[in-house]
Amino acid sequence: MDLSNANMLDEAIVTTKIDAVVNWGREASLWPFVFGTACCAIEFMATAASRYDISRFGAEVLRFSPRHADLLIVAGTVSYKQAPILKQVYDQMPEPKWVIAVGACASTGGFYDNYTTLQGIDEIIPVDVYVAGCPPRPEAILDAVMDIQKQLKREESFSVKHQEFKGKLDDV
Ligand code: SF4
């Protein structure tokens, strides 16, 4: 028997199991940082409160420092003036991290097609899930959290995500 092949096989099996265990833990303990700027942030508050109860999905530990968070939830209109602040928040979050754009404004600028409003946060940071609506209902925000949970199950434990992403502020 080729011993080197046997060792490689063992390593492959162990690595897969570590990924599964780590991702299982992450899936049930997302720590969100909410960048709430407008009406969609009120919908997020409803999502987190008792009626919709985001803690059913293990994501109720809201953080007030990006350094403690792994899920960035951007809820509301983002102006060009706020864009560097949002970018800094994203950059300060440790890997691995995920981003949800809640509502039309965060996803595309919404109906604020004007000189002050960022036309979608994906101009400056990567987005994993977009939530349609103005505003989206709390169920849609919970659906986005479940979508993130599905995505992270497929990831390698120690990978760095979105390395290829280049936003408009990355060269500034
Ligand atoms: S998408 Fe609609 S509800 Fe959400 S922040 Fe924009 S205007 Fe407000």
Image (tube, grey):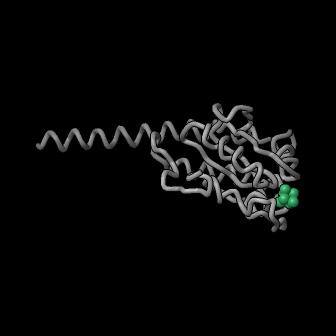
Rendered position, 8 above or below 168: above
**Closest to the observer, 34 or 8:** 34
**Closest to the observer, 24 or 82:** 82
Indicate the position of residue 14 as horizontal and vertical percent values: 35, 38
Indicate the position of residue 30 as horizontal and vertical percent values: 65, 39
- The image quadrant that residue 13 belongs to is top left
- Indicate which quadrant contains ligand 1: bottom right
- The image quadrant that residue 68 belongs to is top right
Residue reaching furthest to the front: 172
Q: How many marks do you count on the picture? A: 0
Indicate the position of residue 161 as horizontal and vertical percent values: 51, 48
Rendered position, 12 above or below 136: above
Q: Is residue 43 left or right of residue 30?
A: right
**Closest to the observer, 26 or 37:** 37
Q: Is residue 91 left or right of residue 145?
A: left
- Which residue is rendered at x = 86% and y = 45% of the image? 46
Q: Tell me, yes or no, if residue 28 can be seen here.
A: no
Quarter in which the N terminus is drawn: top left
- Which residue is rendered at x = 81% and y = 59% of the image? 116
**Closest to the observer, 4 or 43:** 43
Q: Tell me, yes or no, if residue 168 can be seen here.
A: yes
Rendered position, 141 above or below 85: below
- Which residue is rendered at x = 61% and y = 57% of the image? 168
Residue reaching furthest to the left: 1
Indicate the position of residue 45 as horizontal and vertical percent values: 85, 43
Q: Is residue 77 left or right of residue 25?
A: right
